[in-house]
Amino acid sequence: MSTTATATTPYNYAYLDEQTKRMIRRAILKAIAIPGYQVPFASREMPMPYGWGTGGVQVTASIIGPTDTLKVIDQGSDDTTNAVSIRKFFQKTAAVAVTTSTSAATIIQTRHRIPETPLTAGQVLVFQVPTPEPLRFLEPRETETRKMHALAEYGLMHVKLYEDIAKHGRIAKTYDYPTMVAGRYLMAPSPTPKFDNPKMHRSPALQLFGAGREKRIYAVPPHTDVVSLDFDDYPFEVNKFDRPCALCGAENVYLDEVILDDRGGRMFVCSDTDHCETRRAEGHRGEILGQEETRA
Amino acid sequence: MLVETLFAAAPRPGFTDPVMQSQAVFRAVMAALAEPGTVHALAEDITAAIDAPAPITPAAAAILLALADYETPIYLDEAARCGDVAAFLAFHCGSRITDIAADAAFALIADATALDRLDLFAQGSLEYPDRSTTLIVQVAELGDVPGEGAVRLTLAGPGIADTARIAFGPVHPGFVAALTDNRARFPQGADLILTDGTRLVGLPRTTRIEEEVF
Ligand SMILES: [Zn+2]
């Protein structure tokens, strides 16, 4: 018998039954052994709709244990309905400690963003992935995309990106920007903004990707090359923000636009709420809080 | 196997807390494969509780108990095809025991000095490279100063910041060449978990190896 709540609650530890966990755990191990390759798995129904990150939830449920500390973010924020629900789900089913602090977490489940605070060795970042197949919009047939990955035939993707340049003068993709993992597999960082692509490259953390509806798990081990596709004459560039965060003054971070009033007033603030709060706690002040003079 | 054979003797104990101990063992295996060459010790309450029949060690048994089930045939090397090993694994994992290496999801290698080929195990296909064997290789020494018949390797590749070093053995004289061949078949290939009975080290197919002369 399990030493935790499983005897008194109607579900197993971390919700999933043990056979499902073993199946997902085996898929995760093969995903780690073949970086960027999408391992098929038998995705289970979860007590939440698909758009809520059931793939990521199943990965987290299969790896989490009572000594973990879990952080959940959605669009960089710990406070959205989605993030709060998933956090509560694991508090309830896995009796696990939770945090909003990036550095205090052992497992971080995310949709969209990678935290601004650099991740460290031993941490696991779990992505909720809606569209795992980077070639799908070019080739609808699974048998064909599988063949393309088998033979590393990625010319079509380069052609598509080059067409973007011809049409827009630049590569139009701002998120889910395709990457090559360990020089072998084309990987979709769906739906992560391309701003965060460089954070995946040689990260000391383990990165796991779960797609529930598409039934795929893939991984990037620590210290592994994740290179965004580009061309000699059109090198990869991250989205640039022409201002610092209005609240904490941080530069070179991903900003969200916040509407202040109905007269067109707006400000740009860190999308990573933990990063912003940590900086403000350290005394950093952005424009709207009276600039750097008031820094403690 | 006849039912009466299986239950002739009471099965030796496995996990005392299957849910939590499976999770802990899986995390050690995940960390080991994510960072090849790093040594991960299993908690003593896990290895002490498992009374696996010889020659299977507590750590090797723990890995199979955590990860194998009726969906994953287990191959036993010749040294492991003895005593109650098959019955123990069949009872605790519900796995089919196979004599065909190419059919195995997991392979238990009790005698690493007889392991000179990895290409006989399931390699996966180019379309499905994940359908390959994970070998659990028991060695007497792991991570320390290598003794007779042991090898010292420098490792590089995914999961390794620069290079890592690991010593283990004794192994077959052809073992290092078999590892090199395995790497050359990437993205197909087998994945290895080395264990000395209580600790483990991962050697996934991605790892590039160089043998050090000492
Ligand atoms: Zn900020």
Image (spheres, coloured by chain):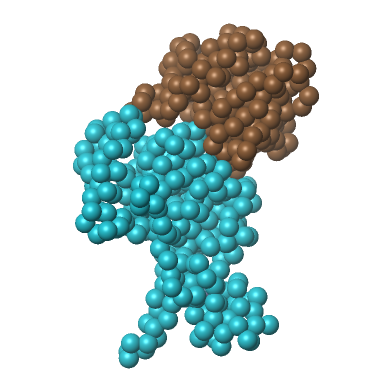
Figure quadrant of residue A262: bottom left
- Residue B40 image offset from top left, x and y in percent: 67, 36
Colour that chain B carries in the picture:
brown
Residue at far bottom of view: A263
Residue at image x 48%, y 72%? A270
Q: Residue at x 53, y 62 (%)?
A: A116
Quadrant of the rendered structure where residue A49 is? bottom left
Chain letter, colour cyan in render: A
The answer to whether one can see residue B41 in this image is: yes
Camera sees residue B75? no
**What x and y, as percent, mark residue B127?**
33, 28
Using the image as rendered, state which of residue B188 and residue B57 is in the foreground.
B188
Q: Nearer the viewer, residue A24 or B119?
A: B119
Left or right? Give the position of A95 relative to B58: left
Residue A209 lies, with reference to residue A282, above or below; the image says above
Q: Quadrant of the N terminus of chain A?
A: top right
State whether residue A69 is above or below residue A24: below
Task: Answer above or below: position of B179 versus A90.
Answer: above
Residue A227 lies, in percent from the top left, at 44, 45
Q: Quadrant of the C terminus of chain A?
A: bottom right
The residue drawn where x is 28% and y is 49% is A161
Taking the spot 76% from the left edge, 18% from the top edge, the residue there is B214
Q: Position of residue B61 (x, y in %)?
A: 62, 26
